[in-house]
């Protein structure tokens, strides 16, 4: 009941903003009010390093005078502040240039159904319990093996929030959400031969997190596996992206089919709609209504209804990723992606990581990438990497100080297989990805 009272309070403030925008002459308006409360605790070398409580709130309003747009924000919800915030947005709009594509979504695009997506699981954890968990996690890593010589600490984080969004078309809705995480990072080795790695677990429900012991041990195991890393000679070879690295590969594709980059003509997938960009077996689809998932929502940042849809099927690009504004710029319909994608899922094959390594046979397993060497306009891809050299499907030794390079158009077309070891800790859900060949620059 208290939760509903909080949503009602936020709705009242959002409605106030919308009403005030109308009084000040705006022809249309939208507003959002969000509150976030949280606790995080970090332990390092068995001692408390930080304990932080978060309590943030923010209000944003956007007004339209015809095709002129202005936005303003505040964290003060007093009546005078709300009026001043709307006044500031109106003032900006009056002086803004006309933009024929600006405006609210079409009314028929707005969400009208709001299923319970199981997004809210508050964790009643206090600072003392959080500190104990962080220390337990770090100890599991530090005591896992004598070679673990130092630590960057373990952190417990718990957040709960409420958000309401409304516009002058009559849309007004809010929801509660939670997000909890546990992470650990340690170092192994000595002198110049130090290696570092980490692990983390994240979920809307604390009961679904990996245990402190598991997170600590995985961080330690990943760190130890990197000891005695060496470089490779320059070569061409197959490359297997571990699942957590494959998300970045798919993320680059999403960026290239996002409206803002398309209408600015800053994309290597310009005019690629209805063309083959992946092998035929690849299917990529959005699942915005998955219960409890991190990217679930029944509407986007503009109130437009989200829906299950294919973005890629049979390897063919079927749809872009568009907001109302970018869709209008492109002469298309919004896809409900203002604010990004929702549980973008890459369908997997039947192979686990071990089977993917056998399929790789001899080549590179990439477990970490460095740098921002992705050119979204040309698709050129060049990033520092580390991981493991694999022969006959078996990991031989860790690898570091190399660069992998290719072109994303070619890389996407040359995907050999997608593993079933999907990383579900983010908004892009994909398993390990095996590429036919990439250039490796090393010694």
Image: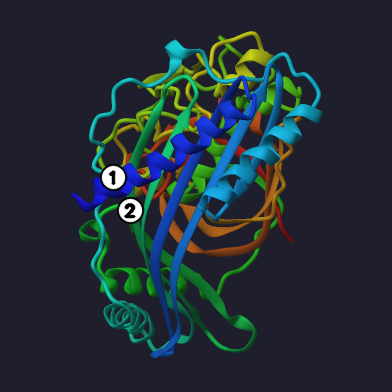
Which quarter of the picture shows residue 157? bottom left
Image quadrant in which the C terminus is located: bottom right
Residue on which the image places disc 2 = 178
Element carrying mark 1 = loop
Q: Are marks 2 and 1 in contact (CB under 8 Å)?
A: yes
Q: Nearer the viewer, residue 421 or 284?
A: 284
Count neighbours of disc 2 (C-alpha within 10 A) and say few if under 14, some if 14 to 19, many if 20 or more.
many
In this rendering, the answer to whether 184 lies above or below 362 is: below
Is residue 442 visible in the rendered structure shown here?
A: yes
Percent from the top left, x then y, of residue 188? 49, 81
Query: Could you say whether the residue bearing mark 2 is in a helix, strand or loop?
Result: strand
Which x, y percent locates residue 332? 59, 10
Name the residue that disc number 1 marks: 119
- Residue drawn where x is 69% and y is 43% of the image: 405
Q: Is 160 rendered above or below residue 352?
A: below
Residue 321, position as x, y percentages in the image: 55, 24
Residue plotted at (55% across, 34% down): 20
- In the image, 262 versus 239, the foreground residue is 262
Residue 431 seen in the figure: no
Drawn side of residue 215 relative to residue 83, left or right: left
Nearest the viewer among 307 and 409 is: 307
Distance between mark 2 and mark 1 Cα atoms: 6 Å
């Amino acid at each position: 009941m208290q939760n509903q009272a909080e949503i009602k309070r936020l709705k009242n403030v959002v409605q106030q903003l919308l009403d005030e925008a109308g009084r000040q002459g705006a022809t249309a308006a939208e507003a959002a009010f969000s509150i976030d409360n949280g606790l995080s605790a970090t332990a390092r070398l068995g001692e408390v390093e930080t304990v932080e409580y978060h309590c943030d709130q923010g209000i944003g309003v956007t007004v339209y005078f015809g095709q002129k747009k202005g936005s303003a924000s505040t964290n003060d919800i007093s009546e005078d502040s709300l009026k001043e915030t709307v006044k500031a947005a109106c003032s900006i709009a009056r002086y803004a240039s006309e933009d024929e594509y600006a405006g609210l979504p079409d009314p028929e695009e707005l969400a009208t159904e709001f299923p319970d997506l199981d997004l809210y699981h508050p964790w009643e954890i206090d600072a003392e319990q959080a500190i104990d968990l962080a220390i337990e996690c770090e100890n599991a890593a530090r005591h896992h093996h004598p070679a673990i010589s130092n630590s960057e600490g373990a952190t417990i984080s718990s957040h709960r929030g409420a958000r309401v969004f409304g516009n002058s078309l009559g849309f007004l809705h809010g929801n509660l959400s939670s997000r909890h995480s546990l992470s650990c990072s340690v170092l192994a080795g000595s002198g110049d031969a130090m290696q570092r790695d980490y692990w983390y677990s994240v979920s809307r429900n604390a009961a679904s997190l990996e245990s402190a012991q598991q997170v600590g041990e995985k961080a330690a195991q990943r760190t130890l596996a990197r000891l005695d890393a060496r470089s490779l000679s320059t070569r061409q070879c197959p490359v297997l992206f571990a699942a957590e690295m494959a998300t970045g590969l798919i993320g680059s594709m999403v960026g290239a089919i996002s409206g803002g980059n398309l209408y600015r003509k800053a994309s290597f997938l310009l005019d690629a709609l209805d063309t083959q960009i992946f092998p035929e077996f690849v299917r990529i689809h959005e699942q915005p209504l998955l219960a409890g998932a991190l990217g679930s929502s029944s509407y986007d940042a503009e109130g437009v209804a989200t829906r299950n849809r294919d973005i890629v099927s049979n390897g063919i690009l079927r749809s872009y990723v568009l907001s109302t504004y970018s869709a209008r710029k492109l002469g298309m319909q919004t896809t409900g992606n203002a604010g990004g994608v929702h549980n973008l899922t890459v369908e997997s094959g039947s192979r686990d990581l071990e089977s993917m390594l056998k399929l790789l046979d001899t080549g590179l397993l990439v477990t970490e990438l460095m740098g921002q060497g992705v050119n979204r306009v040309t698709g050129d891809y060049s990033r520092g990497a580390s991981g493991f050299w694999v022969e006959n499907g078996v990991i031989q030794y860790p690898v570091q100080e190399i660069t992998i390079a290719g072109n994303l158009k070619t890389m996407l077309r040359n995907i050999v297989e997608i593993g079933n070891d999907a990383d579900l800790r983010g908004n892009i859900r994909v398993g390990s990805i095996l590429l036919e060949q990439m250039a490796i620059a090393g010694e």
